[in-house]
Amino acid sequence: MRDYIERLRGEGRLSQVEREVSGRHELAAVIQAAQRESDAPILFHNVAGTRHPVVSNVFGSRPRLTEMLGGTDGSFCHRWVELMRKPPIAPMSVDEPAGLVALRLTELPQITYFERDGGPYITAGVFLAKDPDTGTPNLSFHRSQIISDGELRVRLGSSHHLTEYQAKAESRGEALEAAILIGPPPELVLAAAAPLPYDESEMEVAAKIAGRPLALRRCRTVDLEVPADTEIVVEGRFLPHLRRPEGPFGEFMGFYVPVGDNHVFEITAVVGRPDALFHALICGSPEDLRLLELAVATQVYQALLGASLRGIVDVACVPTVMSTVIKIEQLYEGHAKQVLLTAIGANHDWNKTVFVVDEDVDINDFNDVWWAYLTRGRADHRAMILPEVPGFYRDPHKDYWGRLAIDATAPFDRRPEFLRKRIPGTASIRLKDYLG
């Protein structure tokens, strides 16, 4: 993470804040304002109450995520599938790097994001734990409310593999050891967002993305190996048969999750660099949505390929993770409808709406997607409503049930009529050469 931020700084692609900011609302407000102006990461050098700098919006750009993967054709999903086909790369064990020190949780930035949040949260921590039976490691994201130097309260989503690990340990009356990685190498963050089957390892995915073995060091107090160049590692364990109030918290859908009894994480050590970078992520921000998109878009893309559907170019989730947009090269009459039906079945939680568009549509710009729907045929003939299809797993009132599938492609037999107008040379114009 540190090397990547330094590279962006050297390339002039990093925004920096030198003045002191408060971790209570002000820091989040600055991040939000910056994201309205630019997709650049932002680095805060001076956060009140801590010596640690804070970085945010590192993963808030789809082109930047594609760049992290080494993609050259602009298609994140295509590059992802290429990487996943590579053979596993075994990790290597290394000694603990010199200079790591013991820290206290309350020495780290105490960031309260939203007005009604129950307190400061760790939002970009990547949890690392092992299956109690097989030892398979898992990487995943879970919000963590900071209670004290010795305690976090963590919301474990019902569909996450870490939740199953914890349930296994708890059924035996045992605690589940885990480590929270704050500021790990970027490939670890991407791997944590990946949609993998239960018995596969996100650590192997991270190594494939990096293209080299992961250098792992032993934790000091728990039986885990963590990436040696992680900025901060919080070691500890989930206590069995214990739940305590956590929240409220401003979640990614734009609403507050009320106070609930959630898991208790007992901290046994915090280890990091003396000047460690702290990664802060605003839930529901472009950075959060791009990481959620990684999981959904790649899952849908792989499902379409697995169904032997031809002409699949790319998949995105705009304007939110519950809306999937698929770009295709139309090859036959009814192609788009087949893609729609397959995509709806590819993800049971998130695909509330699914659009299919032609190759000339920018799937990262929802205005362009909606323009295609409005201009390329009859609105009433090109939308399918599928009622009572179960949706988002945390939805007892069925607010996210049902599906809307929209064919926004040009009619197959009339495609030449829908050739988009273009002004030659626009892409190469540099306004500074023309404006005084």
Image: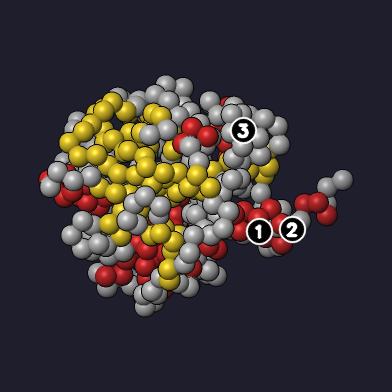
Which amino acid lies under the numbered mark 1 shown in the image of this protein? Arg
**Observer-nearest residue: 129 or 35?**
129
Mark whose residue sits in front, 1 or 3: 3
Q: Is residue 362 visible?
A: no
Quick one: label 1 or label 2, which is nearer the N terminus? 1
- Mark 2, other Cα within 10 Å: few <14 / some 14–19 / many ≥20: few
Q: Position of residue 39 (x, y in %)?
A: 59, 47
Which residue sits at x=42%, y=33%? 149
Q: Seen in the image, is 25 located left or right of residue 410?
A: right
Query: Does the CB distance between marks 1 and 2 fall below 8 Å?
Result: no
Q: Which mark is residue 7?
A: 1
Residue 401, image quadrant: top left
* Residue at left offset 21%, top offset 33%: 242
Label disc, if present, on residue 429 of the rendered structure: 2
* Image position, residue 329 (x, y; %): 41, 68
In primary-sequence order, the first of circles 1 and 3 is 1
Toward the viewer: 269 or 182? 269
Say if 208 sits above or below 234 in the image: below
Picture coordinates of residue 367, whole percent (x, y): 49, 45
